[in-house]
């Protein structure tokens, strides 16, 4: 039949399994899908669906990365300004990867969007968000990220990019040209100040210099503190903080000439990565003593990224499609007689459970109900 589904599962059922596995474990997903559809789906079958779909998405992303590196343009959304944020999440490993990499490994996560839209009194959502996640090395991940971005955005029309991160080496590798402006993530920047500076008065002065954009005075102040304190541990903390603060001024405070935002959107300060790390990955892959293999974590992460960016149904239709031969396309209409309408076939759940009547005499009438036939099958002998 030319089907490209996952095993013996149809495209609709595969999509339902994928959606359920993104919301919970494969065991709970198999149970819920079995109850809803009447099909017998085991947790191993559900995991096989995730593995098959994840590998197809991986092949599609790698192909997009190769085409993007070669200069091909296939994104249609034209935006002059693009916001990018990147971070990592540490996951426990199991099996052979645990022997190769240790007890845990960082999964890299990147998102990109073109602005924010107000959806409530104090609530905003990122617009046209794309995301990708993987365990792979920094160089390969940056190529994958560019391919995912190019799948939605026309990269030739992007004039300025803002990159937000915690200063990790693999994140700074995304600064490919002068059009990319990097800034320290506000969450990690403020966390570093609270972690390395114990004195409240020193913290207040650091924040004052930071928000007034007196960066040279701020660095000189931290250096003076590191040379004046007597405690060796405190001095090492201040030196670490001084080294960490390389790109302190947020992009929206640098006085850059930015294009006008599209109608209905705004350009706000970045800092949504911590929330997206939890929403996209952490809520599903962390906790419950979960351990992952490299391939298993990658396959599920790809589906989670598509689900969060609302691209999973579209991708599923692209990956799982089939063309019926002409001989199978004949339409057959069957008219049921009134006596057959109430009957059903198959093994699906019909709302009733089998049970036995109590053996006590007072429930003898209940046993008699089971022997009654439906009125449609009662014959008249008059």
Image (tube, rainbow, N blue to C red):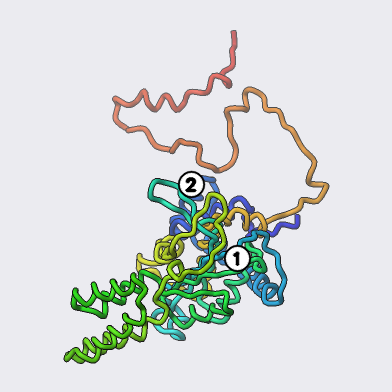
Query: In the image shown, does 160 or 98 lie closer to the viewer?
Result: 160
| Residue drawn where x is 54% and y is 42% of the image | 348
Specify whether 241 is left or right of 86: left
Element type where label 1 sits in the image: helix
> Which image quadrant for residue 210?
bottom left
Count the labels in the image.
Answer: 2
Locate the C terminus by quadrant.
top right
The residue that label 1 is drawn on is 52
Residue 30, position in %: x, y?
49, 55
> How far apart in space, not on screen, are marks 1 and 2 (Cα)?
23 Å
Residue 211, position in %: x, y?
34, 70
Element type where label 2 sits in the image: helix
Q: Residues within 10 Å of mark 2 (few under 14, many from 20)?
A: some
Residue 154, position in %: x, y?
66, 64
Mark drawn on residue 121 = none
Residue 78, position in %: x, y?
64, 60
Query: Residue furthest toward the right?
Result: 326
Q: Residues within 10 Å of mark 1 (few under 14, many from 20)?
A: some
Query: Residue furthest toward the top?
Result: 382
Specify whether 66 is left or right of 134: right
| Residue drawn where x is 34% and y is 71% of the image | 212
Specify whether 324 is left or right of 105: right
Mark drawn on residue 35 = 2
Locate the N terminus by quadrant.
bottom right
Q: Is residue 17 visible?
A: yes
Task: Establish if 206 lies above or below 24.
Answer: below
């Amino acid at each position: 039949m030319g089907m490209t589904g996952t095993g013996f599962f149809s495209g609709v059922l595969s999509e339902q399994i994928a959606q359920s596995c993104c919301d919970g474990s494969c065991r709970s997903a198999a149970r819920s899908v079995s109850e809803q559809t009447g099909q017998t789906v085991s947790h191993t079958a559900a995991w096989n669906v995730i593995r098959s779909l994840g590998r197809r998405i991986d092949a599609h992303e790698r192909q997009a990365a190769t085409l993007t590196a070669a200069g091909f343009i296939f994104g249609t959304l034209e935006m002059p300004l693009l916001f990018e944020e990147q971070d990592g999440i540490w996951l426990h490993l199991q099996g052979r990867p645990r022997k190769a990499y240790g007890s845990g490994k960082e999964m890299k996560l990147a998102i990109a969007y073109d602005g924010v839209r107000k959806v409530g009194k104090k609530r905003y959502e990122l617009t046209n968000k794309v995301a990708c996640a993987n365990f792979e090395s920094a160089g390969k991940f940056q190529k994958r990220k560019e391919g995912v971005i190019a799948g939605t955005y026309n990269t030739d029309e992007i004039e300025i990019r803002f990159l937000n991160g915690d200063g990790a080496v693999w994140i700074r590798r995304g600064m490919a040209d002068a059009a990319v402006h990097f800034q320290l993530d506000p969450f990690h920047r403020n966390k570093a100040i609270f972690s390395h500076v114990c004195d409240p008065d020193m913290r207040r002065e650091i924040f004052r210099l930071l928000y007034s954009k007196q960066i040279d005075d701020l660095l000189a102040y931290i250096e003076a503190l590191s040379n004046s304190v007597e405690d060796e541990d405190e001095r090492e903390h201040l030196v670490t903080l001084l080294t960490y603060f390389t790109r302190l001024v947020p992009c929206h405070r640098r006085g850059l000439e930015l294009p006008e935002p599209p109608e209905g959107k705004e350009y706000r300060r970045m800092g949504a990565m911590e929330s997206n790390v939890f929403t996209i990955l952490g809520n599903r892959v962390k906790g419950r003593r979960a351990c992952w293999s490299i391939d298993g974590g990658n396959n599920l992460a790809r589906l989670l990224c598509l689900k969060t960016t609302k691209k999973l149904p579209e991708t599923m239709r692209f990956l799982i499609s089939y063309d019926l031969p002409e001989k199978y396309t004949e339409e057959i209409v069957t008219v049921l007689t009134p006596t057959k309408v109430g009957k059903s076939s198959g093994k699906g759940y019909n709302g009733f459970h089998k049970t036995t009547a109590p053996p006590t005499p007072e429930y003898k009438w209940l046993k008699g109900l089971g022997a009654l036939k439906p009125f449609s099958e009662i014959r008249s002998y008059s």
